[in-house]
Image: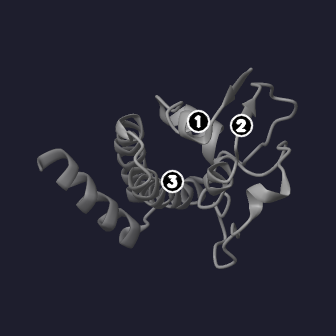
Amino acid sequence: MGVYTWQEWFTQYGSLYNLIWLSLTGPWAKLMKKKCAKGVFFPTDRKYAEDTKTMWKFYLNASKISYEQFAGYTYNQPTNSERKTGIQLYELVHALEEQMSVTLGLGLNIASTCDVYYTAISTACDYTKHAGLTKEYQELSYKLNHLENG
């Protein structure tokens, strides 16, 4: 268990796994003060991953964040959901872009988030390509090409 400021919280990533489980996971199994939700709204125009675009914003409003790694239950998804996974990863990339621009503007070092972003965009490219999500794949591969080739 650890207790963090929001600034410290956003430096805990280190891997795509940590990013997903520490920052972008859904609102379940979380206890928050009402002030953390001030000005934060879940998008209503998304079928998947609306929590991915939203959860990190709650932490910006927190004076401290306490975290205990305990999996009290599991969430099962069908294994044949490559299209859904592609869409979720596509949304994750967009959530990371928004989070990086805001936290950079607040003066945080986002180097570890940039590393995770590269992993996320690479993985999302693979999934969107295999799932036939052409528009999403083209957008992601364009970004990935510029990351890799300057």
In this view, the residue farthest toward the top is 1
**Badge 2: residue crowd in 10 Å (few <14, some 14–19, many ≥20):** some
Q: Secondary structure at mark 3?
A: helix
Amino acid carrying label 2: it is Ile
Residue 60 vs 20, above or below: the answer is below
Residue 111 vs 98, above or below: the answer is above
On residue 89, the disc is 3
In this orientation, which residue lies closer to the viewer: 14 or 89? 14
Across and down, in percent, residue 25 comes to 68, 46
- Please indicate whether residue 116 sits to the left or right of residue 34 in the image: left
Quarter of the rendering containing residue 76 = top right
* Of the image marks 1 and 2, the number of the one nearer the N terminus: 1
Residue drawn at point x = 60 percent, y = 41 percent: 6
Amino acid carrying label 3: it is Leu
Across and down, in percent, residue 50 comes to 66, 64
Q: CA distance from mark 3 to mark 1?
A: 22 Å
Question: Mark 1 sits on what residue?
Answer: 9
On residue 65, the disc is 2
Residue drawn at point x = 74 percent, y = 30 percent: 67
On residue 49, the disc is none
**Badge 3: residue crowd in 10 Å (few <14, some 14–19, many ≥20):** many
* Of the image marks 2 and 3, the number of the one nearer the N terminus: 2
Quarter of the rendering containing residue 42 = bottom right
Residue 130 vs 118, above or below: the answer is below
Q: Please report contact status of discs 3 and 1: CB closer than 8 Å, yes or no.
A: no
Q: Please report contact status of discs 1 and 2: CB closer than 8 Å, yes or no.
A: yes
Across and down, in percent, residue 13 comes to 51, 33
- Please indicate whether residue 72 sits to the left or right of residue 88 in the image: right
Q: Secondary structure at mark 1?
A: helix
Residue drawn at point x = 42 percent, y = 57 percent: 97
Q: Nearer the viewer, mark 2 or mark 3?
A: 2
- Which quadrant, please, contains the N terminus? top right
